[in-house]
Image: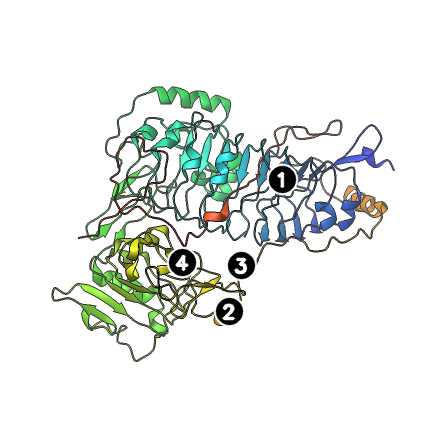
Amino acid sequence: TDVCTWQGVTCNANEQVTMLNLNDAKLEGTIPESLGNVATLTHVYLASNSFQGPVPASVANLPNLQVIDLSFNKLNGQLPQFVSPDMTTMELGHNQFTGQLSANAADGMTGLEIFDIKYNLVTGTIPSLTASLPSLIELDLSNNQFLGTIPGFIGQLSALRWLFLSNNKLSGTIPVELTSESLVLEEIYLHGNLLTGTLPAALADLPELTVLFIDDNKITGTIPKELCDRNLNEAFFDDLEDPDIDQSYSDLYGAGRARRKGIFGRISGGTRELLQAASRRTQREEDPTTTRGGCSSIACPAGYQSRGDNDKDGVFPCERCESEFLNPYIGSNKCFEINQEVVVGLFFDATNGETWGASLNWSDSNVPTCEKEGVICNTNGDVTSIDLPGRGLSGSLPPELGFLAHLKTLNVKDNAIGGKLPADLRFAPLELLDIANNVMTGFVPVGLCQKAGVNGNGKDGIFTCDTIACHPGTASSIGRADAGTSGTKCSTCDANPLYLGSMACSQASTTSSGAITPFGLIGEITLAVFSLGIFFIFIWVYRRSAISRDYIKSSYEYPENEPNQDEVLSSPEHALNGLDGSQAFPPDLEIQTKGHEWSSEKELKKEVWLDVPKIK
């Protein structure tokens, strides 16, 4: 049988197989390693099937591969390290890949245009890719578990148009490198992270920008007037229909988020004309609860939250926070409790108070807040100290602790508290913060690193994150560094402790379950042991199966020029990343001691730290 005549197979003039298109073919099992024996393959489409297991090393080593689409499967293991210098498109989204992204993931791929690994379980920081990526147009790292800061390396991607970093655990500020007028960025999705600082007005200098979502972060200040005047995100609201919304994706993930996803909601030329027309309209921002303007289309203002029936988290329509609640952030979908009795109760629940032990009286509702063990109040009845070392606390610290307006001491060392250290603690007037010897992961929020007075931070003019807690990979006898130039410091550990505030390298290294391990793709390249004939048998089994040959379109949008039997796809659809993880944890961060009050005018193109006043 002539394999080149089989549906799903394309050959070149020399009758060599160059393309395999088995999208949505209801295939199961693992991807056969023998597929890697077809060295002439340039395009492989296996999306929307039920493949499991890792990607075979032989497939990753295909020498002429240009396009690989393995999205919407159940693949797992480390992200594959493809080697073809001709690669233009890598689509690996909606799988179960783990591990970290390698800095050499795109080495030699100067023509790479699309890198898409959304909806996986990738961890660690976003590295600075060692390759030059002059052709990269789309980078989608959304819906993973990336930590650290947004690297300035992205600002070097001169062809980048679509940037998706949403729904990770990224912290720090929006880097100034993303505001260069020379960039051609059209859509930026940063929502659903832990970003702090203010929103740079210089983003308005991006000439092609039409979409910007920064909601559901920890960003303070206001939306700069320059950005409001751009009328961004117009197509994502009900009064403008976006013809590019994939209805099946909306059914799967909700209409609001469907309009905020990569290729599914990318703005078309026709819609762009509507956007341009909308931007010519002058809109005056009024009440964000009733009138949508250029500002609330980007984020609800501080003091508001997105309305409960809003499927567009953190943006219009918004509602004002009720009394006894506070929200210092723009683009928030919640307001925070500030009643100290309620906050103390939230702390009890979040740290699994029922398991603390009978020696504590917190579970007795008849005991006043100021009489609970470990709690100290001032003469006005305001909570000033929570001191519960070694009391069996677990769970996580609630962000509401940061809104205790008189809290000076928070000592929870020697417990089993996990999660992240809340950035909201920067709002409390803390003088002592001790989280040593717990199981917290991630990094110290930048806002705490620059907060004067906490554990003596700022002594001798030195502000460091280590003064708050030793970062993962380091340890000290007290779980943090002494302030100033002398005293105890955090030392690097060979075993790379996983947790914040480790007090000993050996202790931290024993708690390795779930540790973030160094990224290493498939170790030894397994030599192909099956002949080319076995691959043809695989195709033959598929061909003889009862699968419909109609190739029903799957629940996601395939490449616009879907390949057929007669031609090879030459227009790729998705993009790669390369970023600088060197700032993921800044232990020696230099902080300006003078505060900067936000104005609506364009800021200088440098990072500005926001001094947040203590809540009174």
Check disc 2 and report the residue beneath it. 511
The mark lying in front, picked from 2 and 1, is 2
In whole angstroms, how far apart are the C-alphas of marks 2 and 1? 35 Å
Q: 313 above or below 348?
A: above
Check disc 4 and report the residue beneath it. 420
Does label 4 or label 2 sit earlier along the sequence? 4
Say which quadrant the N terminus sits in.
top right
Does label 2 or label 1 sit earlier along the sequence? 1
- Tally of numbered discs: 4
Residue at the (36%, 55%) spot, across then down? 464
Q: Residues within 10 Å of mark 1 (few under 14, many from 20)?
A: many
In whole angstroms, how far apart are the C-alphas of marks 2 and 3? 12 Å
Residue at the (25%, 61%) spot, across then down? 431
> Mark on residue 39?
none
Check disc 1 and report the residue beneath it. 90
- Secondary structure category for the residue under label 1: strand
Q: 348 above or below 339?
A: below
In whole angstroms, how far apart are the C-alphas of marks 1 and 4? 32 Å
Question: Does the CB distance between marks 4 and 2 fall below 8 Å?
Answer: no
Q: Which residue is nearer to you in this view: 514 or 134?
A: 134
Q: Residues within 10 Å of mark 2 (few under 14, many from 20)?
A: few
Does label 4 or label 3 sit earlier along the sequence? 4
Does label 2 or label 3 sit earlier along the sequence? 2
Quarter location, residue 276 = top left
Residue at the (41%, 42%) spot, across then down? 191
Q: Position of residue 19 (x, y in %)?
A: 74, 35
The mark lying in front, picked from 1 and 3, is 3
Check disc 3 and report the residue beneath it. 516
